[in-house]
Amino acid sequence: MSEAITIRRVGMNEAMACVDALADVLIDCVEGGASVSFMWPITRQTAVAFWRRVAEGVASDERILLIAEGGEGRIVGTVQLITAQPENQPHRADVAKMLVSRSARRQGVAMRLMAAVDEAARDAGKSVLVLDTVTGGDAERLYERSGWVRVGTVPNYALMPDGTPCGTTFFHKQLVPLTSS
């Protein structure tokens, strides 16, 4: 039986306190082969510096940070919503760094994070979301099951952590505002 998972938004005061735990998740994912902008071996210094920049973005209200916590409050997953967009795109946000620790996969954590990111986007007044992912990976199927629409694929767009070229598939999602009854 899997442990209870809680999904929640991290505010600006807490984001910096989560940096080390988020670095653990990032390192685990990159070590496991996830193409999420980092090469293996990723240093702890690199991972911590990345999450500090994310925390600064949360503090400046440029992004929303969601975390998934397992037993005893251990962070096992995360996703970001980048809300700072050009002035002609105030209705749009980018979904970034959807990460789940290998030990917490196949337990519905990613689906719950994606549902939470939809809710956070609506709360922020966003109606168009975009993201990209490795072509042919598990995340592609996750996004399709979550209602995302495939836009297209760019071959050799990025590198896997081991340096192997990989294609990237782009998705969008049009959010319909929730109506209260």
Image (cartoon, helix red, strand yellow):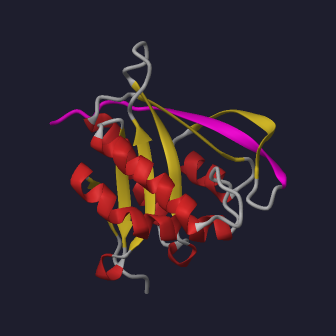
Magenta highlight range: 164-181
Residue with the most extreme bottom position: 1
Horizontal and vertical percent position of residue 139: 62, 54
Residue ID at (38%, 33%): 83
What number of labels is visible?
0
Asked whether residue 163 is in view, the answer is yes
In the drawing, does residue 172 fall left or right of residue 162? left
Image position, residue 123 (x, y; %): 26, 37
Q: Residue at x 35, y 35 (%)?
A: 62
Work out whether residue 20 or residue 167 is closer to the camera in this orientation and state it. 20
- In which quadrant will I find the N terminus? bottom left
**Residue 175: x %, y % from top left:** 40, 32
In the picture, which quadrant includes the C terminus?
top left
Q: Say left or right for 124 vs 150.
A: left
Q: Nearer the viewer, residue 137 or 60?
A: 60
User: Is residue 3 placed above or below 159 in the rendered structure?
Assistant: below
Q: Residue 25 in the image: state x and y as whole percent.
A: 50, 68
Residue at x-position 41% and y-position 42%:
81
> Which residue is outermost to the front?
45
Residue 119 in sight from this viewpoint = no
Q: Between residues 20 and 142, which one lies in front from this camera angle?
A: 20
Identify the image quadrant of residue 154: top right
114, 75: nearer the viewer = 75
Decide whether residue 26 is among the magenta residues.
no
Q: Residue at 38% of width from left, 28% of height from top? A: 127
Residue 100, above or below 172: below
